[in-house]
Image (tube, rainbow, N blue to C red):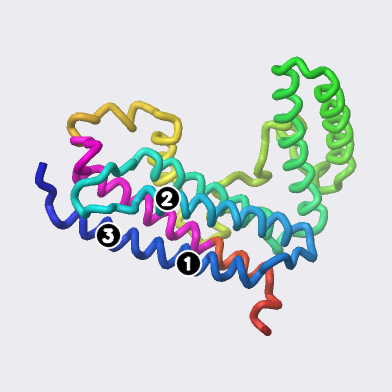
Amino acid sequence: MTLEPQPQLVFAEVTEAFRKKVSEAKALSISVGVRHGTLEQGYGSAIFLKIIMVSESILKITDAREPTRFQLDHFSIGSMARDLVEAMIMLGYLTDGAVVDDVKRMRRTVLNLHDCTARYKMFKAWKDQEQKRGFRNVMMDLRRELTANPAFRRLPEERRKELMSGKVMYLEGMRSIVRNLDWDGDYFDGLYTYLSTYTHTSPMSYYRYNEHGVNTEAPSDFQLAFASTALGAATLAVDTAIDRVRALFPQLHSE
């Protein structure tokens, strides 16, 4: 199968742009080092490290030894690009310095309750009674902490019930965080829907398999185009994460 040069060219250019952005992120991570003076800095550094590691895995997939004959795993590129977007969102959420103290505490409690609820369900399914009881007790403590929060008490009753369930991770929703990170909301909605189909093996990811000419030796135009779209999103996610980490460690600017 002979590929048109344009998809290959775009793929090469987007890959190189992503590679440079990842190198910038790695250099910043080295500069940050172990400066974890606050909880936000500690969590932010951990998420930033994940972003770099996932990015490195993407680059390994795009490493073509021959320009026209290699296995391009566009499925995994799409899934990992979505992972980067989600990590960027969490990083932005945890490092948002524009919220008042009551809301900041409520955000953290909601996250902790979501985490604890997931652990409770996991150990309950695994029949680990000791762990299940322990996390159930912590869930009760976190719910009491929520009810004592003035910002929580100001919420409508229905919303309070949702938060108490432990199913909610982001207090204001992902789209709100994305807007605060200066991403276009419509672009995010379309991108997240598209990449999610590859993460969850939804029909969109395989219904047109033959039509798209998916090939394990010479990637089709579609594979290159999809991978380029995913890499473009990944580059934007890493770039946004870099900005957040720089803001999280302002002392770096004076050194």
In the rendered image, residue 214 lying in the magenta stretch gets the answer yes
Which SS class for mark 1? Answer: helix
How would you rate the neighbour count of disc 1 (Cα within 10 Å): few for under 14, some for 14-19, many for 20 or more? some
Which SS class for mark 2? Answer: helix
From the viewer's perspective, tell me whether residue 176 is left or right of residue 95: left
Q: Residue furthest top?
A: 127
Q: Residue furthest bottom?
A: 254
At x 33% / y 31%, what residue is drawn? Answer: 204
* Location of residue 180 in the rendering, given as x and y in whole percent from the top left corner: 57, 59
Q: Is residue 40 above or below residue 82?
A: below
Q: CA distance from mark 2 to mark 1?
A: 13 Å
Q: CA distance from mark 1 to mark 3?
A: 17 Å
Q: CA distance from mark 3 to mark 2?
A: 14 Å
At x 70% / y 24%, what residue is drawn? Answer: 122
Figure quadrant of the C terminus: bottom right
Which SS class for mark 3? Answer: helix
Please identify the quarter of the rendering in which residue 171 is found.
Answer: top right
* Location of residue 187 in the rendering, given as x and y in whole percent from the top left corner: 41, 51
- The residue to which callout 3 is attached is 12
- The residue to which callout 2 is attached is 58
Which of 191 and 78 lies nearest the eye of the viewer?
Answer: 78
How would you rate the neighbour count of disc 3 (Cα within 10 Å): few for under 14, some for 14-19, many for 20 or more? some
Please identify the quarter of the rendering in which residue 75 is found.
Answer: top left
What residue type is disc 2 on? Ile
Mark 1 vs 3: CB contact within 8 A: no
At x 72% / y 36%, what residue is drawn? Answer: 115
Mark linked to residue 23: 1
* Location of residue 125 in the rendering, given as x and y in whole percent from the top left corner: 70, 17
Q: Earlier in the sequence, mark 1 or mark 3?
A: 3
Start and end of the magenta stretch?
Answer: 213-240
In the rendered image, residue 94 lying in the magenta stretch gets the answer no
From the viewer's perspective, tell me whether residue 209 is left or right of residue 163: left
